Image: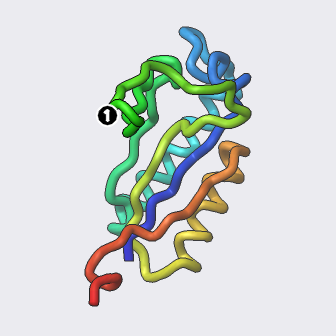
Amino acid sequence: MKYLLLSYTPAAAWDAATADTPSEEALAAFAAYQEFQRELTETGEFVAGEGLGHPVVSTTVRRGPGGVVATDGPFAELKEVLASFAVVDVTGRERAVEIASRIVEVLGEPIEIRPIMGEEFTA
């Protein structure tokens, strides 16, 4: 079963994490995450994953009273922002939780686990 792992980071920490010269701590965490990702790739559980761009360069598309509107940047000040995602294909929720727990140990930020709707959700 496939799960989407969504990684969040405090909005205030975003600039520091994406600075031109990341801290040694940030580099060490990234290296540990890359090693873990290699492990998941070797077991066949890692499907895809990417870091996301800064929230101020995002665009939100919504339907409003006058039709569909695209708005640049975030709507409001956010406490946490979505920083990255990974897709894993594992035996079940318990394994997805194990994987997310290891990522949280390394990065220290929360991970949201969402099942990806596929054949097992169709009637």
From the viewer's perspective, tell me whether residue 99 is left or right of residue 37.
right
Residue at x 35%, y 30% (from the top left corner): 66
Which color scheme is applied? Answer: rainbow
Q: Which residue is drawn at 29% across and 75% down?
A: 118
Q: In this view, does 48 lie above or below 82?
A: below
Q: Position of residue 113 (x, y in %)?
A: 55, 63
Number of numbered discs present?
1
The residue drawn where x is 53% and y is 70% is: 96
Using the rendered view, name the quadrant where residue 57 is placed.
Answer: top left
Q: Disc 1 on helix, strand or loop?
A: strand
Give the side of residue 36 with respect to residue 11, left or right.
left
User: Relative to 46, is 48 above or below?
Assistant: above
- Depth check, front residue: 40 or 112: 112
Coordinates of residue 95 in the picture (x, y in percent): 54, 76
Looking at the rendered structure, the kind of residue marked 1 is Gly
Q: Position of residue 52 (x, y in %)?
A: 45, 33
The quarter of the displayed image where residue 81 is located: top right
Rendering coords of residue 17 (x, y %): 62, 23
Near-viewer residue (12 or 21): 12
User: For the C terminus, which image quadrant?
Assistant: bottom left
Q: Residues within 10 Å of mark 1 (few under 14, many from 20)?
A: few
Q: Name the residue under label 1.
A: 67
In the depicted structure, whether residue 91 falls above or below residue 79:
below
Tell me what residue is drawn at x 41 percent, y 52 percent: 38
